[in-house]
Image: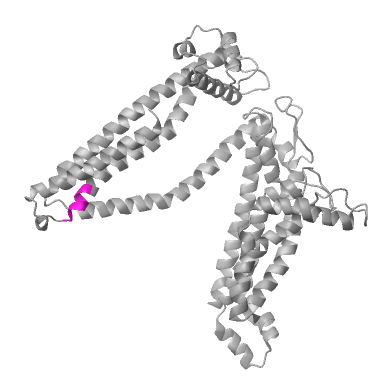
Amino acid sequence: MPLLWLFLIVLAIAAVGYVVGRARALQSVDGDSRHLHSLPSYYGANVALKAAVPAFFLLILWLLAQPAYVNSVVSAMIPENAIADGSSRGLVMAEVRRAADGLDNAVAAGDMTEDFARNARADFNDITQRLKDAGQIVTSQITQPVLRAAQEYRILNAAGALYMAIAVIALAIAGAVWGVRESHGEFRARNTVEKSVLALLVGAAMIAILTTVGIVLSLVFNTWEFFTLYPWQDFFFGTSWAPSFSGRGGSSELGVLPLLWGTFYISIVALAVAVPIGLFAAIYLSEYAGPRVRAFAKPMLEVLAGIPTIVYGLFALLTVGPLLMSIFGKEGLNWMQSGTAVMTAGLVMGIMLIPFVSSLSDDIINAVPQAMRDGSYGLGATKSETIKQVVLPAALPGIVGAILLAASRAIGETMIVVLGAGAAARLSLNPFDAMTTVTAKIVSQLTGDADFASPEALVAFALGMTLFVLTLGLNVFALYIVRKYREQYE
């Protein structure tokens, strides 16, 4: 049963339970709602919550647990001699899932019957050819163990979906019946509903935490799989980035140092542009600009934050790159070989980061107590002296935090780098050379020609884990600085 239909069925049971529960509560007091402990709607809501919430909770748990169970069962079916040299069980399981998806799509399109797809005696060469004729993406030749595992994978998933639908619907009906039986005049429906809603709100607040945990775990598991296929020493200390999609990673050089260098180099150039302009703009808006100028300039400055990064990338590719080439290229100083370079991406990224620095710094400067300014003026200091010696030192921790947050934003940027900095992974100090970053290579590795479970594709998760640790460290450091020194000026 499709998930959408299952979802609608549970909602229908909850809706019917709401009506029945409300009517039963009124019936228990002969239609006089004054004799009810709670409003009639609370009795209906109690039934609806008892029908829907446990059923949806079971649905989510089942959807999380079933793939792990099916993968473990199917993986145990694959003998060790079916795993080729240079491959791994994870790679074989990727082929199994791809073959199972191909069989599902072929059956859905009518190119293959369900009985033939499940036939354990079917010839794997015939299956391979039929899937290719149906336009399904499979490996060059499906082996017998992979075919048997794919068939079992489909059977287990189909059985699991059926059992899940039965269990979820049964639990929804049981919850509705339980709620209806509670619908009588003396039942404290409002208390129960409010506690249930509070629990739902707490669960909603936990979603962000659980999502973060899920992202980290997915990165960790795939990164671990990568390091089982590729030496971690070569990844963290290698100075060459040359992935080869022709094999299983035997001829690939996947050193991360050139990518980290490109990431930090472009980010440094971007911050060198964004920090002075953004900080000076924040000082002007908070200390010098009048109400009319501030009301116009601040929104216009923050418009830069709403421009999509792909637009910035096109601006770097079509405008800034040719402009720099006319000055530093062959027609000028001959320092620049092409329009895609660190300087191109850094300048445009710096423009993008200006509102991040200016807006946060402006808010932080405005948070400095006016009494500190008045005290400085009372001692005879000028406006500029007050800003330099009182306001900026008081706001410095927050400004540093804003700069570090902008730095983490620069490190995670992708489109500007792809279009403005090029794709060359190199260790160079020349800001007019083309370079690339970690995020750009994550995109290219996941859109390459290798199998998803090959080292060339799994390296994207290792790169993502490295980038996650770096940006997390910057954010934690920024928050530490802000919290440590903020109390001195409150």
The N terminus - image quarter: top left
Identify the image's colour scheme: rainbow, by chain, secondary structure or one colour.
one colour
Location of residue 195 in the rendering, given as x and y in whole percent from the top left corner: 27, 53
Examine the rendering and report whether any part of residue 135 can be seen: yes
Instruction: State yes or no: residue 399 in magenta.
Output: no
Examine the rendering and report whether any part of residue 77 can be seen: no
Location of residue 309 in the rendering, given as x and y in whole percent from the top left corner: 66, 52
Nearer to us in this view, 375 or 326:
326
Instruction: State yes or no: residue 42 in magenta.
Output: yes
Q: Is residue 46 above or below residue 361?
A: above
Quadrant location of residue 166? top left
Helix, strand or loop: magenta stretch: helix
Extent of the magenta region: 38-44
Nearer to us in this view, 62 or 83:
62
Nearer to us in this view, 467 or 111:
111
Q: Is residue 196 above or below residue 354?
A: above
Location of residue 421 in the rendering, given as x and y in whole percent from the top left corner: 77, 49
Location of residue 127 in the rendering, given as x and y in whole percent from the top left corner: 56, 12
